[in-house]
Image (cartoon, rainbow, N blue to C red):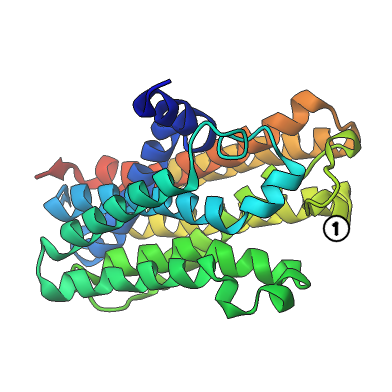
Amino acid sequence: MSFFVSFRTYLAERFPVPVTLLLSVATIAVVMVVVEAPHLRVGGPFIVEAHAVTGALMMFLLLFHLRVFDEHKDFAQDAATRPDRPVQRGLITLRQLKIAGAIVIALELALGFSHGFESGLWWLLPLGYSVLMLFEFFAPHWLSKRYWLYAISHSLITSVMCAALVLRTGVPVSAELWVLVAMALASTFSIDVLRKTWMPSSEIAGVDSWSSLIGVGRAGALGGALLVIAAACGAWLGWRVGGGPIWIGVCAAITGYALFEIRKFVVEPTAKREKLLQVVAGVHYLVVWLGVAVAAIAAHGVTS
């Protein structure tokens, strides 16, 4: 099997490109809303700038290099608990991923500095944070015993990334930026919780899950609470830039649906409902995040 075929198979299993692209576009859409918030609040149109395109690409590439870092960091554990994964079964090697990761990081920096030196420097913030994640903040054993802190510290990468993407454009810190940071943490943390909330027969010895640590009911409640926080942040951001009652209703509706599906799993855990939790978390992210930009465009129009 050629490297390109193996790499394509690896991506399909461990880094689904279409989904990751959608998440990157959704994220940069809100980033640009925050960047343009003062302009939008006085009735100006939503402007699609070059920063938006490069920002989406930079986020996509950073998510890939995070996957590469995780493959190296978790190799031993995955070999013991999940030998069917691509790297563990020999489909692709850590060395090949290391080369791909180095190329991707170089591309991130090139894109970051393409808008100026100061703009590029901001990207060193999430890049540096990703390195801290790779080395588990140089306290792996201490952090592994504090799963809550571990999960929050790793979920914060999206907040750091969003802050860097906003600040690289030269705009000052604002209330919208702080809400975006909170929204990013809540959304990313909710995905982590819901994709690791499993039915009893799905639990894997040696692998932490939220359902094994705090129980299925509490894990579902935690995931649901995080979705509510993310939706509230998204509703506020959309309202600030022209979104009206319809936008608030959309946030409430998608969150209500998510809570309904979570409750169904908690009451009667099944394999189908377990898989649906991940879908629910992803769909909620896409609807709320893309929706903020759609609300701004609906209110003020769009230009380039």
Q: Secondary structure at mark 1?
A: helix
Q: Which residue is painted at 68% across and 47% down in the image? A: 78
Q: Residue at x 9, y 45 (%)?
A: 304
Residue 283 as seen in the image, left or right of residue 48:
right
Q: Does residue 242 show up? A: no
Q: Is residue 115 left or right of residue 112?
A: left
Question: The N terminus is located in which quarter?
Answer: top left
Q: Quadrant of residue 160?
A: bottom left
Q: Amino acid at mark 1?
A: Leu
Viewer-proximal residue among 221 and 124: 124
User: Where is residue 72 shown, x and y percent of the image?
Assistant: 54, 55
Q: Crowdedness of circle 1 by 10 Å Cα count: few (<14), some, many (20+)? A: few
Rendered location of residue 85, percent (x, y): 62, 35
Q: Nearer the viewer, residue 301 or 50?
A: 50
Please tell me which residue is depicted at 68% across the width and 30% down the height of the picture: 276
Residue 37, x across and y down, in percent: 26, 63
